[in-house]
Image (cartoon, rainbow, N blue to C red):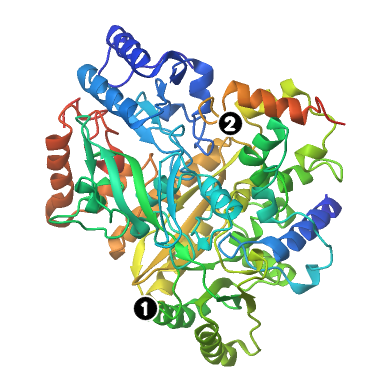
Amino acid sequence: MSILLPTGMNSAAFDRALGDFRRAIGDPWVLSGEEDRQTYIDPYAMGDGLDHDCSAILAPGSVEEVQAIIRIANQHKTPLWPVSRGKNLGYGAASPKEKGDLILDLSRMNRILDVNEKQASCLIEPGVGYFDLFRYLRERNLPLWMSVPGNSWGSVIGNALDRGIGYTPYGDHCETLCGLEVVLPDGSLLRTGMGAMMGAKGWQSYKYGYGPGWDQMFMQSNLGVVVKAGMWLQPEPEMTAKITLALPRFDDAAWALDILCDLRRRDIIQHNIVFGSPVRAASTMSQRADWYTGPGALPDGVSQQMMAKLGLGWWNAKISLFGDEGSVMAQVALIRRLFEPRLGGPLQFEIWKRGDPLEKSATGIPTTMGLQSVNWYGGRGGHLSFAPVLPQDGDMALAYAKKIKAYYEEVGQDYYASFTIGRRHINNVSLILYNRDEPEAVTRVDKLYRHLLKEAAASGFGEYRGHISYMDEVAATYDFADGALARLNGRVKAALDPNNILAPGRNGITGRAHGGDRP
Amino acid sequence: MIRIFAFVLGLILALMLIAMPADAQGPAAPKSANATPIATTAMGAILYGAQSANPGEKLFGQKCAFCHIGPSTGKFMLARRLPKGQAELPDRRDLTPDYVKAVVRNGLVNMPTFTRVELTDRELGQIADWLGRKGRK
């Protein structure tokens, strides 16, 4: 690792920019040494990660410092890659899409500015992590619950802006945001929703304000730096009930998806439902070598052994119910009625009532347990996710999953899949585990990802989120009317960020590396 | 190998049954695993050190405990290769402050690096001193 320059900058220009950044935010918060840059390499990089190395890191401590950085970046035409906490693991973590961009690390801006118990909302900065907010709520014993993603190490705002999800009624994280404060690419400050009014009292109460709502413009994009966000929290319910349904056969996915999707559409089940294969569960508690050391993909017989030993089905769906006692018990009865005849035995729900230990409840408790999965193949592990959006049709989803499983087996990768059921869609998540230091594994994973992307697009299914190594490729699959969406994104980008300083190429929007330094 | 695996698996299943949050990955464990009483829960790990007077322990609670205490990913990975009773970092007697600092800044196998923005040198020094047992038995 040596000195690296941002795309389109020579070393004299880069040094001048660094000098201005140092004067603006203080020497300790401009990190350009090799050792610091190394700590920002994606821990799940495919290979050494240097293909997404940054040239320096800027760590502002306030909104004013973010504004100052953006103004300086415009003067020097310095590309910045903003991250909230840089823990977008499986999507590139803190690393920029384009090698050499400066990481704008907002981790120091980590204040919980307000929690309104009565209105069940909060106002936070991007450096606030799930563990921080959870600790804040529990230490004060507030009757407010959070939704958390499978890996909860990251930023609450960052996850929501990348449209991450959780598995409680507030699990569509981008939908829970209410009011953003954003530094625009010219360094000016914007508040969305009711915050557009000076002294607004309802910033966290109503999302839309007056006229067009711009909040979605700042999600999965490169059109502003979100420096504050309001978010709704879940008022603690009176009761929860939870259960894991173990479906014994692969083909059970079709009928079970249809029933569960119907319950989801009717809001009887109020949360995103996850529906996972045996490796998904086994990889959080064991390694591949504990089960199988042979070549190629894990044989189905070994999956059957896992299922027997761990008490799993082929698909394992977690269901939680939230509400007052009367409605929760009625919903329990309904789900028993729907599933017991098909599964051939009584379903035992775990019931929590207000006052019981919180662990028994279905609340979101932040965790990093899921990260254990990267240890599946041994060595320094990583994971990559491919998760196209399907309509809620059990037969269609099963047919697609069968095709994907066959391809995993063809390339010799252990099949790890889950379905996530949203309000009107299913994500068929293909998680791809690897040892990042094994070149054959990295090659296999890349081949698999590209195949999945092509296969899904040909079937009419688009990926919902992008890893930094595949952002252009995913964007290219959104090709209606010869890429009309990409052209609109490019026009908006050119209007708001004419110097293309903010996250060039993020989600495929106006890169620098292949297309010069102008949008 | 098989014996270590069986032990770790049993431990994990027991912990998961008690403390696995509904939204974490993985299914509920089979009932037979609910034999070992476990003191530390997922919530206990997150709130670890909150009341401590030692700044190193307090910071460990905020920055490290969710992966190294209770039902947690770092603990389970370490349990595979360390002697029994050593998988939680505060129980270790072989950690020196310099070793802790080196691992935190460089990572180790699946432990990611921590940046000097997320954890300043001063904060890391306090955690490393505490884990290295400076000022405690």
Residue A296 can be seen in this image: no
When asked about the image quadrant of residue A283, the answer is: bottom right
Q: Amino acid at mark 1?
A: Arg
Residue name at image x 39 percent, y 44 percent: A467
Looking at the rendered structure, which numbered label has been put on residue A265?
1
Residue B98 on image: x %, y %: 72, 20
Q: Chain of mark 1?
A: A
Along the line of sight, the residue nearer the viewer: A401 or A114: A114
Distance CA(mark 1)–CA(mark 2): 42 Å
Residue A426 on image: x %, y %: 39, 68
Residue A229 on image: x %, y %: 35, 47
Residue A234 can be seen in this image: yes
Residue name at image x 27 percent, y 21 percent: A78
Along the line of sight, the residue nearer the viewer: B15 or B52: B52
Say left or right for A50 vs A416.
left
Along the line of sight, the residue nearer the viewer: A433 or A264: A264
* Quadrant in which the C terminus of chain A is drawn: top left
Residue name at image x 27 percent, y 26 percent: A70
Mark 2 sits on what residue?
A: B113
